[in-house]
Amino acid sequence: MSHNSDAPVEPITIPVLQRWKEEGRRITMTTAYDAVTARIADPVVDIILVGDSVGNVCLGFDDTLPVSMAMMNHHLEAVARTKPRALLVADMPFLSFHLSPEETIRNAGGLLQRGADAVKLEGGSRRAGMVRALVDCEIPVMGHIGLTPQSVNVMGGFKVQGRTTDDALRLLDDADHLQDAGCFALVLEGVPAELAARATETLTIPTIGIGAGPDCSGQVLVFHDVLGLTLGHRPKFVRAYANGFALLQQALSHWAADVRQAAFPTHQQSYRLPDGLRDTIANWTPSSST
């Protein structure tokens, strides 16, 4: 949604999202990894996610597994400095919430201290204990089930989940258990639309879909996917709303051509000496030549 700059702007909070779920108002969420992307996204979306997808999108990794807490802290700080009105959620990267409740709390608390409003972690019922530990410490948690990228090796690739009876029922159980553990919202990724619709219908908390059909409480897409800034294969669930990569490369090519043809910079992009100094500069000779 876009906002009238003259109207009062309501900060997006967890109770606001809950109210929207009850009212049937759709929620929008995208990623940001630095101040520029945050400033572009903030007037438009309801939730900004500093995702561990920064590994694929910005850092050149094949998946999210190499992303560390130090990397997440670095990118979160850049986004938080923009003071977004959108709810700011930070991903907990691989191994940051797997070893002990104490370490999980310390890592998640560090994200809140750096400006996040909430954290997101991947996994189903087996993560319910960690979710409870965080919620007990007043750390809001967004869950993430279905196709969970940190589990890519176990899943054998980025594959749609919940297509068998056992897997579909397990996903619904996972959603219920995570809600019971205290999650304020759930990301449903890479699951059949009918399954996501059933989860959304039965949960009281909002669901945010990505490759999960049209019936979730909201939708999330990676910023760079929405704007067409990525190359190569695009998943089925991605719709690019601009050919951003080609547009930006074209603009940069025009600049480079102007430089090579001495068409940039012109006087309009140059600073000028005051009139009284021009003769002085013209009459100057290097001291080494005297």
Image: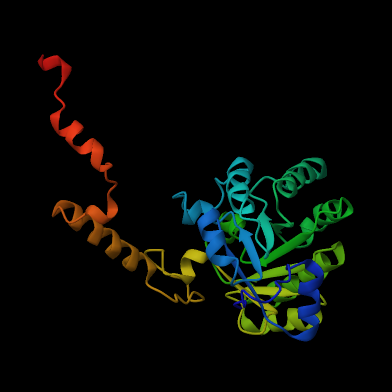
At 82% from the left and 45% from the top, the residue drawn is 101
| Res. 265 in view | no
Q: Is 275 situated above or below 85?
A: above
| Res. 20 in view | yes
Q: How is colour applied across the structure in the image?
A: rainbow
Rendered image quadrant of residue 10:
bottom right
**Looking at the image, which is closer to me, 70 or 244?**
244
Q: Position of residue 90 (x, y in %)?
A: 67, 55
Q: Position of residue 40 (x, y in %)?
A: 53, 65
At 25% from the left and 57% from the top, the residue drawn is 255
**Looking at the image, which is closer to me, 100 or 263?**
263
Q: Position of residue 266 (x, y in %)?
A: 22, 54
Q: Position of residue 65 (x, y in %)?
A: 56, 49
Would residue 113 be found to the left or right of residue 209 on screen? right
Quadrant where the C terminus sits is top left
Q: Is 212 situated above or below 96?
A: below
At 58% from the left and 54% from the top, the residue drawn is 52
Would residue 98 be found to the left or right of residue 63 on screen? right
Quadrant where the N terminus sits is bottom right
State the count of labels: 0
**Looking at the image, which is closer to me, 205 or 288?**
288
Rendered image quadrant of residue 153:
bottom right
**Looking at the image, which is closer to me, 256 or 108?**
256
Q: Is 284 situated above or below 74?
A: above
Rendered image quadrant of residue 159:
bottom right
